[in-house]
Image (cartoon, rainbow, N blue to C red):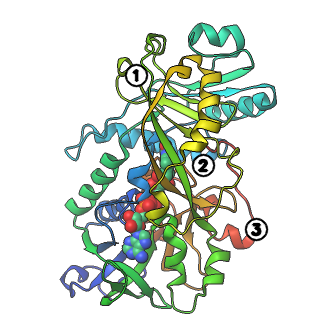
Amino acid sequence: MLTHLVSSSRFSTKAATSKSFDVAVVGAGAIGCSIASFLLELDSSLSVAIIERDPSYKIASSVLSVGSIRQQFSVPVNVEISQFGVDFIKNLSSDRNGDVQFDQGGYLFLAGKSGEDQLRENVALQNRLGSEVNHLGGGEELKRCYPWLNTDDIVESSLGASGTEGWFDPYLLTHALKKKAIAKGATVINGNVVSIAKDAKAIGIADVEGTRQVETLRCGSVVCAAGCWSQNILASVSGVSAAAAREWLPVYPRKRNVFVIHCPDPLLVDPPVPLVVDTSGAYFRREGRPENGIFLAGGMEGVASEDLDCDGTAEELANPDHEFFMDHIWPALAFRAPAFENSKVKSSWSGFYDYNVFDQNALLGQVLPSVDNFLVATGFSGHGIQQSPAVGRGIAEKVLYGEYRSLDLEVLGASRVQEGREVKEKNIV
Ligand SMILES: Cc1cc2nc3c(=O)[nH]c(=O)nc-3n(C[C@H](O)[C@H](O)[C@H](O)COP(=O)(O)OP(=O)(O)OC[C@H]3O[C@@H](n4cnc5c(N)ncnc54)[C@H](O)[C@@H]3O)c2cc1C
């Protein structure tokens, strides 16, 4: 039961002043919109506001994502989250809110000697949980499947079954979730959240620049879905210092680059290129029809010598790191698929991971020990867009019933940072 309605009557809130909402969601990225949509799906009598400072989504991670979804994780709950995610995404195509261009191209994980045991362990776990992920072996065996791949040093590999993994348009997914939320009655407010009352019963909203406070909303609960800027939202709660916010919500913007490559080599057309996660940490996948010869590439976070926290500004995203591509990514690609030696970078972009430096997994739910109506959903560290459906449903349940009912997300509770309980995802891409 939702205990934090703005009024005493469960059914009177819609009629209350437009400045009062049962739930205020901060951030209209995929996560915030999904939460709002599921809240209203579970209880259409609720009043829900989504507050977003940039409706153009210029630097929101959701629209700058690569939009990939996989079953191949090492943490059980991440596998289960994506199982729901892939069904949700497939069902969207039959929904009037739209197709998100889901390409069921699959993920091919590669392992050399040092990664073999881990890969086998992961696949065993994924299969145990009901995800169909197959071993494709290494060396000649794998080469027969993908003649364009250099498999000399590959000992083992795995590929998710058709229909379970692939990629979609993250912009379309974000908008589909937003449209769903609005269609069910959510109110989208354009503004910058600058302050939150100690008991999370009121939110101060400024103009988009954040310079002039323009209104105060009353609310029953606040859900912070502000992506890599979530720590600022926590620090805006009255009585929470910036240092405490850093300690309790160790989520920082980390710049990630994506390169769009043209490589019209007929070898790469058949069989088409899935999303390949190389032993080096680089990834590449085809974009669009195989015969177009367009690929996206990025990754290698383990190789980056300096992976610095950023301030999360648009300026920081202005220049994708082409030197990093030339020095690290391109050599790795050309080693793994020699056809990429003859390729050209057509364009590039950068976005921020909402990077959880504690254990690279989502931080969900209550974060302030004594405030149970202030929840967070952030820290996804590169796998957030695919988690938006299951996390949206889970947080909606948590707000409404005080517990997860469909899929238990408790293991990802944000309080684990204070408890020192790590949930390490070994398959970070
Ligand atoms: C290059 C790149 C590739 C990625 N690839 C994948 C992938 O293949 N698969 C995958 O699952 N994930 C991927 N991710 C990660 C994924 O995109 C994110 O984890 C996810 O989109 C986070 O969604 P969000 O809604 O929490 O954040 P966002 O989309 O960033 O939304 C947060 C919103 O909050 C708003 N906001 C912030 N502060 C305030 C405030 N004070 N007031 C009002 N509004 C505010 C922001 O304007 C923003 O719109 C990738 C990310 C990047 C950068």
Residue beneath label 2, please?
77
Residue 397 seen in the current view:
no
Q: Amino acid at mark 1?
A: Gly
Q: Are marks 2 and 3 in contact (CB under 8 Å)?
A: no
Query: Which residue does the image show at 46% across and 28% down from the upper left?
Result: 344
Q: Position of residue 246 (x, y in %)?
A: 64, 76
Sequence-first disc among 2 and 1: 2
- Cα separation, mark 1 vs mark 3, equals 46 Å
Which quarter of the figure is the C terminus placed in?
top right
Q: Amino acid at mark 3?
A: Gly
Is residue 112 left or right of 31 when viewed as pictured?
A: right
Residue beneath label 3, please?
420
Residue beneath label 1, please?
293
Position above or below: 283 against 227: above
Is residue 270 left or right of 325 when viewed as pictured?
A: left
Q: Amino acid at mark 2?
A: Val
- Mark 2 vs mark 3, foreground winner is 3
Q: Position of residue 340 (x, y in %)?
A: 54, 22
Secondary structure beneath dot 2 equals: helix
Q: Ligand 1 sits in which quadrant?
A: bottom left
Secondary structure beneath dot 1 equals: loop
- Mark 2 vs mark 1, foreground winner is 1
Secondary structure beneath dot 3 equals: loop
Query: Which residue does the image show at 34% across and 62% down from the upper left?
Result: 42
Is residue 349 left or right of 142 when viewed as pictured?
A: left
